[in-house]
Image (cartoon, rainbow, N blue to C red):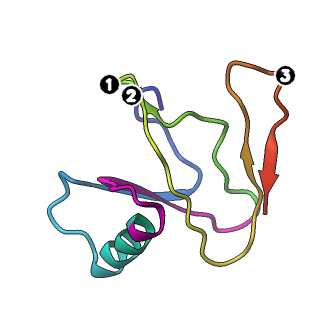
Amino acid sequence: MYDKLIPDPGLTAWYSSATPAWPPVLLEIKERVEQACGIAFDSVLLNYYRDGNDSVAWHSDTLPSSGKHHAIASVRFGESRLFKVRYKTNKSFRSLTFR
């Protein structure tokens, strides 16, 4: 978080263009997502939520080192859970919740 390592209550993994070998199943999912949205992605963050106690806090998909906003694709497998989106700087916009 904020370019610092902190304990994470969930289970996570990160693959990027710098990772030597992506598992074949991840490459297949990546290709399908890219075809569906017409965007090429160069990294993936995997979050495994063991139960209702694992989650991620509000965050932005801006890499501090680049200062740029990046497109994200969210793919869910397994149980449904809430996915919330809110406007960061203009609080007059209502937040959206997806299941």
| Horizontal and vertical percent position of residue 13 | 40, 59
What residue range appears in magenta? Answer: 35-51
Are the residues tagged 1 and 2 within 8 Å (C-beta)?
yes
Give whichever of discs 2 and 3 has the lower sequence position: 2
Taking the spot 81% from the left edge, 38% from the top edge, the residue there is 95
- For label 1, the residue is 65
User: In this rendering, which labeled residue sits more in front, label 3 or label 1?
Assistant: 3
71 in relation to 67, above or below: below
34 in relation to 97, above or below: below
- For label 2, the residue is 3
Give the spatial CA distance, label 1 vs label 2. 8 Å
Taking the spot 66% from the left edge, 40% from the top edge, the residue there is 57
Find numbered disc 2 in the image and state the secondary structure of the residue it sits on: loop
| Horizontal and vertical percent position of residue 63 | 40, 31
Indicate the amino acid at tag 3: Ser
Give whichever of discs 1 and 2 has the lower sequence position: 2
Q: 57 or 37: nearer the eye?
A: 37
- For label 3, the residue is 92
